[in-house]
Amino acid sequence: SMTRRPTRAQRKALTQIKAAGEALTPRQVYILETMAAVEPGDEAGELVYERGVAFLGDERIAARTVFALLRACAISLDGGEIGGVERYCINETGRAAAQAAKERG
């Protein structure tokens, strides 16, 4: 079968993902890899944020790290905010950024 070339929009998105992967710190990449390793929908892969405190499982995550991942569009709010608690999950951009970082070593 013929392989279709990526559209201009897809090429632009891939470039942005690659740039985001290169801009991420090792800690941010570790968090994304941890989130990506969990089955979608499993709460163990959710980053939970409340009043300046964030956790991924039992591990505390700095609020600035959460904001950096949001700026990189690597995580998305999952189900909105309930009682002041925000739950974030990794998205396709985050998965691609983690993969790009992994491929670079």
Image (cartoon, rainbow, N blue to C red):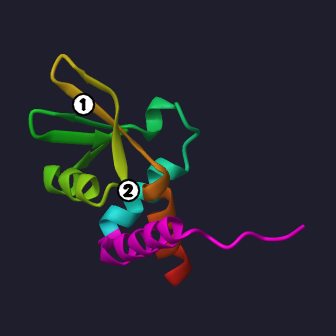
Position in image of residue 78 (x %, y %):
37, 31
Q: Is residue 84 left or right of residue 90?
A: left
Q: Is residue 16 visible?
A: yes
Q: Is disc 1 placed on a helix, strand or loop?
A: strand
Q: Amino acid at mark 1?
A: Glu
Circle 2 is placed at which residue position?
Answer: 31
Q: Looking at the image, is mark 1 or mark 2 earlier in the sequence?
A: 2
Residue farthest along the front direction in this orientation: 8
C-beta proximity under 8 Å, tags 1 and 2:
no
Height in image: 39 above or below 13?
Answer: above
Q: Is residue 105 visible?
A: no
* Residue density around tag 1, few if under 14, some if 14–19, many if 20 or more, within 10 Å: some
| Quadrant in the picture for residue 21 | bottom left
Q: Residue at x 50, y 63 (%)?
A: 96
Q: Which segment is the magenta one?
A: 1-26
Q: Amino acid at mark 2?
A: Ile
> Label 1 vs label 2: CA separation?
17 Å
Q: Is disc 2 placed on a helix, strand or loop?
A: helix
Q: Residue at x 44, y 71 (%)?
A: 12
Height in image: 76 above or below 71?
Answer: above
Position in image of residue 93 (x %, y %):
44, 57
Q: Residue at x 23, y 51 (%)?
A: 66
Circle 1 is placed at which residue position?
Answer: 86
Position in image of residue 16 (x %, y %):
39, 71
Q: Main secondary structure of the magenta part?
A: helix
